[in-house]
Amino acid sequence: MWEVLAPLRAGAEAEAVTVRPRLLASRAVKPSLPWIFWVALLPALAACTTVEPGQDFNIADVVYEENFYYCSVEPQLFAFKCGPGDPGKGDGNGSCHFNVTSFRMTDYTPLVGDSCTSPTGIPTGPIAPQAKTNYAAAQAKMQLDPKLAPLLNRPIGKSAHPRVVFDLSQAADQAAAKVIEDWATKFSTQ
């Protein structure tokens, strides 16, 4: 960079100076603008530094709507036997999300969803600690883009999973998968 500026400081004629700026040590950047632009830009590039975000720097966490989970998502997970497995579909009893995976669900009754005013409503009863554990586990498997979310992709068979939980050729299964997909749009950042 200083090699470009040295002839100018020494009083060389502008016509005699060949400027070949090297930005970020890349040969892919070719000066298509007049050389004076590059000469003016070089001190600014040399002064570039990182930004110090300060002591209170936080990356916002994505928090998915808790009530929608309790009233809509969790009832689907229990209805399709994601916790105990479904012996009718080849799962051994107790071999699924109640026992053996990193997405661990906890069995409890009555479900919080049983006290909801509607599938998209608000629970009217207390939130059981087991439900809160299930919510935290499910939230960890959700993504803003549901096409990338293990909570949706595994049960529909797009990612590795022992069985297809939601057979998208069946209307009821499509509706259950849609509930999980909709949950991806119900979030806030904190």
Image: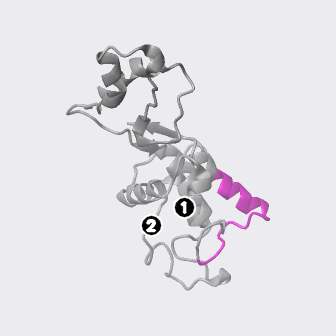
Amino acid on which the number 1 mark rests in the picture: Pro
Q: Give the residue type that dot 2 points to.
A: Met
Quadrant where the N terminus is found in the figure: top left
- Residue furthest toward the left? 55
Give the image location of residue 43, x and y in percent.
33, 22
How many marks do you count on the picture? 2
Quarter of the image holding residue 186?
top right
Q: Residues within 10 Å of mark 1 (few under 14, many from 20)?
A: many
Q: Residues within 10 Å of mark 2 (few under 14, many from 20)?
A: many
Quarter-of-image position of residue 118: top right
Going 48% across and 45% down the picture, which residue do you hit?
64
Q: Which residue is mark 2?
A: 105
In-front residue for pair 103/135: 103
Local secondary structure at mark 2: loop
The part of the chain drawn in magenta is: 162-179
Q: Quadrant of the C terminus?
A: top left
Q: Residue at x 59, y 43 (%)?
A: 120
Residue at x 35%, y 39% (from the top left corner): 59
Look at mark 1 in the image and give the residue it sits on: 150
Residue 18 position, x and y percent, is 46, 26
The answer to which of 66 and 55 lies nearer the viewer is 55
What percent of the width, then of the height, locates residue 122? 51, 41
